[in-house]
């Protein structure tokens, strides 16, 4: 299968752009790793930071809906603060 010159040039351009973006992505990944390491060195919990970043990316309505569902499930299993307080008072 032969590609015409214009198609070859276009292919080379795409490959070049992809390679450049992959390099940038690797550099950004290394930068993120450094920031998380710095935060950890200053006493912050990296797992909690990652969760916080994840939550901040979400749409507010979607986040509230997920939190309500989680709260409902926790309550159903007796794992929320209200259920714990009720159990303490009963004892």
Image (cartoon, helix red, strand yellow):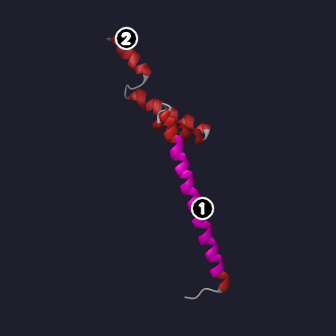
* Residue 48 visible to an observer of this rendering: no
Quick one: quadrant of the C terminus? Answer: top left
Magenta part of the chain:
8-35
| Image quadrant where residue 59 sits | top right
| Cα–Cα span, label 1 and label 2 | 59 Å
Mark 2 element type: helix
x then y, percent, for residue 66: 51, 37
x then y, percent, for residue 65: 54, 36
Reading the image, the residue beneath label 1 is 21
Q: In the rendered view, would you say 79 is above or below 31?
A: above
Mark 1 element type: helix
* Residue 3 visible to an observer of this rendering: yes
Residue 80 left/right relative to 6: left
Which residue lies at the image location 52% right of the left edge and 50% below the top edge? Answer: 30
Disc nearer the start of the sequence (1/2): 1
Nearest-to-viewer mark from 1 and 2: 1
Q: As drawn, which residue projects farthest toward the right?
A: 6
Mark 2 neighbour density, 10 Å: few (under 14) some (14–19) many (20 or more): few
x then y, percent, for residue 8: 63, 81
Is 31 colored magenta in this rendering?
yes
Which residue lies at the image location 35% right of the left edge and 16% below the top edge? Answer: 87
Q: Are marks 1 and 2 in contact (CB under 8 Å)?
A: no
Reading the image, the residue beneath label 2 is 89
Query: In the depicted view, which residue is nearer to us: 55 or 12?
Result: 12
Q: As drawn, which residue projects farthest toward the left?
A: 91
């Amino acid at each position: 299968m032969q590609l015409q010159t214009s198609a070859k040039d276009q292919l080379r351009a795409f490959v070049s752009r992809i390679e450049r973006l992959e390099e940038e992505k690797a550099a950004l990944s290394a930068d993120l790793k450094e920031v998380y390491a710095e935060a950890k060195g200053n006493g912050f919990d990296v797992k909690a930071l990652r969760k916080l970043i994840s939550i901040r990316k979400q749409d507010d309505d979607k986040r509230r809906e997920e939190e309500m569902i989680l709260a409902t499930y926790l309550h159903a299993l007796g794992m929320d603060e209200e259920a714990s307080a009720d159990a303490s008072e009963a004892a």
